[in-house]
């Protein structure tokens, strides 16, 4: 939507004045409004279907994806397990085919607080069905408390075992 609006505006500026400077100024304008320069969030975008009071946002894969309140309860449980204060929540994107195309069930972008999780790897009621979600939430919460990213990415924290299985 935004991209289409910007394209229309760019076309308008180009048609109206022929000045390319007007087009080049647009990204700076966005950056000044607090948007990251990488505005597409590593190609995943920022849209979400539901948001919890603590800021956790969920993009559902389909109707079978657990709803935001149940996912938020897991988020709060993992934070409590780690004894960290609950920070503003991450963006969790549930999508099909992640495991098949990347060979991992979850992908994390610590710089934008975004996690993409294979939608077939979440079943809150099944044994082990919270594993991937909790694993990614440990990554997020460690980063939020300033844990070194190299150690985070190396899973060098006892919370990965202590707080991943409910
Ligand atoms: Zn990991």
Image: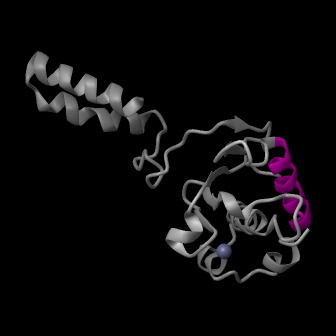
Q: How is the image coloured?
A: one colour
* Res 8 quadrant in image: top left
- Kindly identify the residue that appears in the image at 10 percent across and 26 percent down: 19
Prevailing secondary structure class for the magenta stretch in the rendered image: helix
* Res 139 quadrant in image: bottom right
- Kindly identify the residue that appears in the image at 16 percent across and 32 percent down: 21
- Kindly identify the residue that appears in the image at 72 percent across and 42 percent down: 63
Magenta range: 69-85
Tell me the quadrant of the picture where the N terminus can be found. top left
Tell me the quadrant of the picture where the C terminus can be found. bottom right
Residue 73 drawn at (x, y percent):
87, 50
- Locate residue 148 relative to residue 135 in the image: left or right: left
**Residue pushed farthest left?**
18
* Res 126 quadrant in image: bottom right
**8 versus 126 height, above or below:** above
- Locate residue 37 relative to residue 64 in the image: left or right: left
- Kindly identify the residue that appears in the image at 78 percent across and 38 percent down: 52
Who is closer to the viewer here, 48 or 145?
Answer: 48
Q: Quadrant of ligand 1?
A: bottom right
Residue 6 drawn at (x, y percent):
31, 29
């Amino acid at each position: 939507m935004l991209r289409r609006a910007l394209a229309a505006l760019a076309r308008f500026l180009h048609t109206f004045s022929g000045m390319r400077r007007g087009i080049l100024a647009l990204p700076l304008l966005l950056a000044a409004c607090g948007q990251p320069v990488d505005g597409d969030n590593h190609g995943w975008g920022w849209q979400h279907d539901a948001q919890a009071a603590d800021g956790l946002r969920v993009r559902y894969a389909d109707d079978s994806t657990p709803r935001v309140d149940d996912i938020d309860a897991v988020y709060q449980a993992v934070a409590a397990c780690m004894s960290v204060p609950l920070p503003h929540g991450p963006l969790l994107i549930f999508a099909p085919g992640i495991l098949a195309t990347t060979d991992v069930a979850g992908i994390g972008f610590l710089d934008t607080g975004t996690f993409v999780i294979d939608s077939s790897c979440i079943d809150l009621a099944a044994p082990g069905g919270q594993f991937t979600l909790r694993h990614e939430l440990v990554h997020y919460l460690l980063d939020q408390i300033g844990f070194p990213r190299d150690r985070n990415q190396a899973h060098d924290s006892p919370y990965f075992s202590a707080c991943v299985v409910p």
